[in-house]
Amino acid sequence: MKRVALFGPESTGKTQLAQQLAAHFNAPVVAEYAREFWDQHGGITLAHIPMIAREQWRREDAAVALAPPLVLCDTEALTTVLWSDLLYGTCPADIRAEAERRASNYTLYLLLDVDVPFTPDPQRAFPDLADRARCFNLWREALERRQLPYQLIRGAGSARQQQAIAAVNQLGF
């Protein structure tokens, strides 16, 4: 079983690409619970981070327990930590520790570049290209510092999809 995480800052097309990959590979997608939480509660605070992280992990573990050959994760543990640090200046220590432990669970991270237009959304915080680039660098550094396997995905539309499919195909699919 292989886990592939779609990784990168906001408005880079992770959700759309996860759905495209799911259709192509006939694989389950673990959706981003933080988005669902926000829609239900109208926002997220630092106090919500542990519950959001644990529910995301529970859903991912449930998908993995079904033992499909491939599980696609629209978000993952490091993203929770990165957003918590970025928005609140900290992250609960137990969440950070579990994120570090879980980071090696992924066979591949698909790191999505910010080279696509920003799509406004009430849940998004950084429409400015300079801020988006700064976030992208934080996400890339998180992977590189931990020496996690990743493939950079760039371009718009079908180019992004083709690169992602090729990267997953290299895993034996």
Image (cartoon, rainbow, N blue to C red):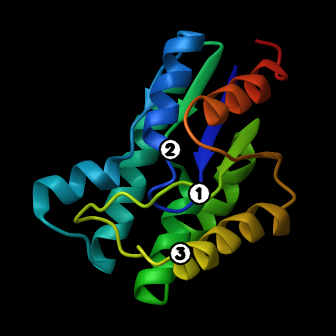
Q: Quadrant of the N terminus?
A: top right
Tag 1 residue = 8
User: Mark 2 and 1 residues: CB-CB less than 8 Å, in contact?
Assistant: yes
Disc 3 from disc 2: Cα separation: 18 Å
Tag 2 residue = 14
Residue 70 spot, x, y in % from top left: 63, 19
The residue located at (42%, 40%) in the rendering is 58
What label does residue 129 carry, if any?
A: 3
- At label 1, the amino acid type is Gly
Within 10 Å of disc 1 (Cα), the crowding (few <14, some 14-19, many 20+) is many
Classify residue 25 by image quadrant. top right
- At label 3, the amino acid type is Leu
Residue 21 spot, x, y in % from top left: 56, 23
Residue 6 shown left or right of residue 46 in the figure: right
Q: Is residue 73 above or below residue 144?
A: above
User: Mark 1 and 3 residues: CB-CB less than 8 Å, in contact?
Assistant: no
Residue 116 shown left or right of residue 143 in the figure: left
For discs 3 and 2, the disc positioned in front in the rendered view: 3
For discs 1 and 3, the disc positioned in front in the rendered view: 3
The residue located at (34%, 67%) in the rendering is 124
